[in-house]
Image: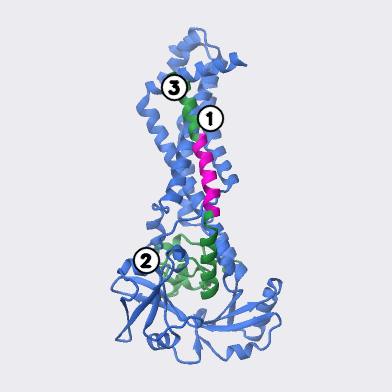
């Protein structure tokens, strides 16, 4: 087979796979509807406010409830020492106050 | 038209043979290029899906959470603050909550301990998050221990929270209010915060303003602020994302730098020979255009597909150590794939366009010069 035909085949296969990711996303969104509803119900029942992505520090565990002094929690000149503090931005309502 | 397609097919044939002659260099280039696209696409897909999911599930979080601040820090709120708030128009319910954190030094894990009033739990019963159950190896009926104030408190696991909701509940420990007060030493009449329900979403901000006027030491956190926090999570300005973005941009600059100032002696010789045997400048430009397209398009397709599998089928395993930090508990979750077409189109444009341009410009310079001069 010619190189150009092989490349065309590769291109078509790649495009088909990309199209399949879109179809997969749509079908997974449909399948996840119930599961998302259950998660939302848990949030509503327990009054949860945050995602549990990082559990190491209170201000990254409950990002939206962090206060202005979270990063200086031990001493006025003590900077944030948890790695996740460099990943999550402080909540916007603190920055905009 | 058929003639045009046939000509392009021959050009692609020749380009691929030319690329395969420098296999090591070109496969290395493709690998690094794919890796950059993979990194950027992974961050884009992960961030967008996480934002969408957070937006859906946190839509049910409390309309207003009232915290008391003392010296700039969150402090306990007395129960009589509910009376002090008085009657606030639009507020349908006020509920004081008990919750806090607990560090278990044995497994080096932080728990979020809550005492919800709607669950019927005896003082020795506990409901735990799936992350805790997995980390400690607990099942329903097993005993879960908390050590506090030189005392050990044992609870029987009554239930484990749904593992599909780990993203919000992996570290939760639900116990009775009485047990919570005994363990934490929080006296009766004191609570962690107060939650308000507001009937009309448009009145929430007004209610918060009135609240702060009545009780100046409280801070209301609104649901819309929670949603905005997660809508801007992993914005390009912050830490690791910024480093990643700068790293990727620098890599693209290096690619362009490598291509733009000139060609290698071998490439120049190739162009000279092609011109000498009768190729036109336009043909050489077309060939190099195909070279740029073949490498950048392949890198985009492979990088994007690998990123999709990484984020949605391996639970973004490469991000886990970054997000986890020093924590022991980390949720096992599979994000629902939400794809932002505009983001992907932007990535496509920035992956393909600069590389093709950076490939064509120096070639154009070389292809318009005399073949004899190039070969010499």
Dot 1: what SS? helix
* Residue B334 located left or right of residue B341: left
Nearer-N-terminus badge (1/3): 3
Total numbered labels placed on residues in the image: 3
Magenta stretch: includes residue A38: no
Residue beneath disc 1: B356
- Chain coloured blue in the rendered structure: B
Asked whether the residues under marks 2 and 3 belong to the same chain, the reply is yes
Task: Determine whether label 1 and label 3 are within 8 Å by CB.
Answer: no
| Quarter of the C terminus of chain B within the rendering | top left
Residue nearer the viewer, A13 or B200: A13
- 2 or 3: tag closer to the N-terminus: 3
Residue at far top of view: B277
Give the spatial CA distance, label 1 vs label 2.
45 Å
- Residue at image coords 39%, 88%: B182
Q: Chain of mark 3?
A: B
* Residue annotated with mark 3: B16
Q: Is residue B249 above or below residue A8?
A: below
Letter of the chain in green: A
Disc 3 residue crowd, few under 14, some 14–19, many 20+, Cα 10 Å: some
| Quadrant in the rendering for residue A57 | bottom left
Q: Would you call the spot at circle 1 few (<14 residues within 10 Å), some (14-19), or many (20 or more)?
A: many
The verdict on a common chain for dots 1 and 3 is: yes
């Amino acid at each position: 087979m010619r190189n150009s035909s092989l490349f065309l085949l590769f291109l078509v296969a790649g495009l088909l796979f990309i199209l399949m990711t879109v179809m997969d996303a749509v079908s997974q969104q449909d399948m996840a509807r119930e599961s998302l509803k259950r998660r939302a119900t848990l949030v509503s029942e327990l009054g949860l406010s945050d995602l549990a992505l990082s559990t190491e520090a209170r201000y990254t565990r409950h990002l939206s409830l962090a206060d202005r002094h979270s990063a200086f929690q031990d001493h006025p000149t003590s900077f944030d020492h948890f790695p996740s503090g460099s990943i999550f931005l402080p909540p916007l309502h603190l920055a905009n106050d | 038209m058929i003639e045009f397609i046939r000509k392009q097919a021959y050009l692609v044939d020749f380009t691929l043979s030319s690329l395969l002659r420098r296999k090591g260099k070109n496969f290395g280039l493709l690998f690094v290029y794919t890796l950059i696209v993979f990194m950027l696409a992974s961050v884009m897909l992960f961030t967008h899906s996480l934002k969408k999911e957070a937006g859906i599930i946190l839509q049910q979080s409390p309309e207003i959470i009232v915290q008391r601040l003392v010296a700039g820090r969150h402090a306990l709120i007395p129960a009589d603050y509910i009376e002090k708030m008085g009657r606030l128009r639009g507020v349908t319910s006020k509920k004081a909550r008990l919750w806090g954190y607990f560090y278990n030094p044995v497994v080096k894990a932080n728990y979020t301990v809550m005492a919800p009033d709607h669950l019927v739990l005896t003082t020795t019963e506990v409901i735990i998050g799936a992350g805790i159950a997995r980390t400690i190896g607990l099942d329903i009926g097993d005993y879960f221990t908390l050590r506090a104030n030189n005392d050990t408190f044992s609870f029987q696991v009554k239930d484990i929270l749904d593992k599909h909701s780990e993203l919000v509940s992996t570290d939760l420990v639900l116990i009775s209010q009485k047990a919570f007060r005994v363990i934490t030493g929080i006296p009766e009449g004191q609570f962690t915060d107060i939650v308000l329900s507001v009937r009309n979403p448009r009145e929430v901000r007004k209610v918060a303003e009135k609240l702060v006027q009545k009780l100046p030491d409280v801070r209301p956190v609104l649901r819309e602020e929670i949603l905005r926090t997660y809508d801007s999570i992993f914005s390009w300005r912050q830490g690791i994302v910024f480093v990643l973005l700068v790293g990727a941009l620098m890599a693209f600059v290096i690619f362009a730098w490598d291509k733009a100032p000139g060609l290698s002696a071998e490439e120049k010789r190739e162009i000279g020979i092609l011109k000498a045997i009768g190729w036109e400048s336009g043909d050489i430009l077309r060939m190099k255009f195909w070279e740029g397209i073949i490498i950048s398009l392949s890198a985009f397709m492979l990088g994007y597909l690998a990123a999709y599998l990484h984020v949605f089928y391996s639970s973004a395993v490469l991000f886990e150590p970054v997000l986890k930090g020093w924590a022991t508990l980390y949720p096992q979750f599979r994000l629902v794939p939400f794809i932002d077409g505009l983001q992907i189109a932007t990535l496509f444009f920035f992956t393909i366009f600069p590389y093709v341009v950076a490939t064509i410009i120096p070639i154009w310079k070389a292809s318009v010069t005399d073949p004899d001069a190039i070969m010499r």
